[in-house]
Image: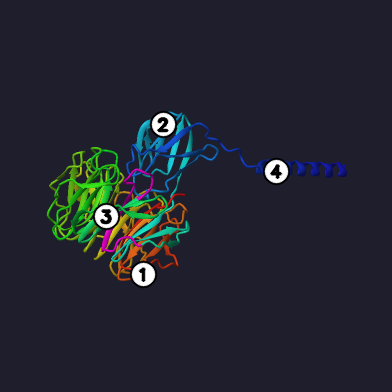
Amino acid sequence: MHIRQKWTCLVLILFILVMSCIKSDPPTAVTPVGIITAFAFLKAYNPELPFDVVGRIDQDTGIIYADLSNMPPCHNSTLVATFTASVERVESGGKIVTSGETPLRYLPWRTLIAVAGDRSVEYEVRLRQRLDAYVCNLDVNRVWLNTMQGLFATTSQELGDVQTFSAALGDFDGDGDLDVLANNYTDVKSVWFNNGQGLFTDSGQSLASSNGYDIALGDLDDDGDLDAFIANLENYADNVLLNDGTGHFSDSGQNLGVTSSYGVALGDLDDDGDLDAFITNMDVGDLVWLNDGHGNFTDSGQILGFSTSFKSDLGDLDNDGDLDAFICGENGCTVWLNSGSATFSDTGQSLGERGIMDVELADLDGDGDLDAFSVHNGEAALIWLNDGSGVFTDSGQALGASWSLGVALGDLDIDGDIDAFVANGVNQSNVVWLNDGNGLFQATSQNIGDSSSTSVLLGGLIGY
C-alpha cells in the first residue's frame, strides 16, 4: 500500500508537470489576413509628395510599412491616405473612417482599427523616412546628410553667397526628388534643382527682389504642382509665386498687405479644400488671407493680436478637426483656436516670456496630440505639452542656451519618435536633440557647422 501511494504521487506530479508545460506554450496569434488589403499615400491627394507611396502590409503582424524618404518630414501633416478593407468599419484616433477610394485625412494616423462584429484587429502604420538637413546661413547654405542615427555628415557644397533667412524643400520639376527655393534677403529668390543624389544646381531664375524672410510651399492654384507664398520684411508686400510644373516660377502679380511680415504658414483654414495663409507680422496683428482656390488671396479682415510675432505653426490643437495656430514672438507664445471657418479666437494663454524666434508642432510625448518645440534668442529651447484640448504647459525642460533662430522636427535617428534640429546664429554650432519617446530630449555630442545659421529644413535629399 505504501509503494502504491508513492507511484500515485509520482504519476500525479508528472501529470502536473506535463500540464504546466502545455499551458506555458504561447497562444496562437490571431492573423488579420485580408482585413485591410491596400494602403497608400497618393500624390493626387498629397501634392507635397513627389510620387505615390504605396504601403506594404504585413498581414501576419498587422504592420503597414510606408517609405517616405525623398520628401519633407510628415510629422505634423495630416496626410491623406487611401485604403481598402473587408469589414464594415475602420477606426482611427477614436473616429470612424471610410474604406475604399474616398481619401482619408486623419491625425493621429499611426493606428487603424478594423472592426468586424465583436472582433477587432489593430493595424500599426510605420513610416520610414531618412531626413537630411538643408541649413540656411548668413554666408553660404549647406547640405548635411543623415547617417540614420541622428548624426550628420557635411558635403562640400556651398549654395549661394547671399544672406538667406529661409528656404523651402519640394519637388518643383516633377522628377521625384526634393529641390530648394531659397528666400534670399535683399536679393532675388533662387531655385536649385536636385539631381536625385543631393547635388544642387542653380536654375538661373531671378525671382521677386524684396526683403524676403519666410516662405511656404503648397499647391495654391490647384494645378498639381508646388507654388510659393513669400513673406517680406520692411513694408514690402507679400507675394505669390506660381509654378508652371517644371520648376519655373512667375510672380502672380498680387501685392498682399503693406506690413513687415516675419512668417507664413499654409493650411486649409476655412475647410473649403484649398490652402489659405496665416501671416505673422511686426508691430501689428497677424493676418489671415483666404484663397479662392485659384491662387488668388483676399484678406479675411481679422487682425489677431497687436505685438510682434515671428513665426507660427498650424495644427489641430484642440482635436476638433480644423487647423489652429500656435504663434511665437517677442512676448512669448499664444494659442489661437479656429472656429472651423477661419475665424480665430485667442485662448488667453501666455507661454514663455520673450524672444521666441521659431516654433514647430508635433506629437513629442507620444500621447496622440500636438505639442510645441520653441527656440529662443540667447535662452534655452522649451517644450510645451498639450493636454489634448489645446491647453499647453511647460514640460520643465530647458534645452541649451544658444542664440537660436530656427528649428525643424522629425525622426532623425529612425526610432519612431520626433527629434529636433536647432539652427543657431552668432557662429554657434547647430545642435540635434534626440527624443527618448516620452518627450524628454538629450543633445547629441555633435557640433554641426560653425556659421551663423538662420533656419533648417529636413527632407530626404538623396535617393536610397
The amino acid marked with disc number 4 is Cys
Q: Is residue 327 visible?
A: no
In front: label 1 or label 2: 1
Residue 169 placement (x, y as % from top left): 33, 51
Residue displayed at 20% across by 61% down:
186
**Residue range of the region highlighted in magenta in the rendering:** 158-178
Q: In the picture shown, does residue 247 fall above or below 30? A: below
Residue 131 placement (x, y as % from top left): 41, 54
- Specify whether residue 297 is painted magenta: no
Instruction: Determine which residue is flagged by label 2.
Output: 89
Q: Is residue 5 visible?
A: yes
In front: label 1 or label 3: 3
Instruction: Determine which residue is flagged by label 4.
Output: 21
Chief SS of the magenta region: loop
Q: Earlier in the sequence, mark 2 or mark 4?
A: 4
Q: Earlier in the sequence, mark 4 or mark 1?
A: 4
Spatial separation of the CA atoms under disc 1 and disc 3: 24 Å
The amino acid marked with disc number 2 is Arg
- In depth, the one of 204 and 455 nearer the eye is 204
Residue 450 bears which disc, if any? 1
Instruction: Determine which residue is flagged by label 3.
Output: 190
In front: label 3 or label 4: 3
Q: Quadrant of residue 312?
A: bottom left
Asked whether, in this view, residue 242 is left or right of residue 148, the answer is: left
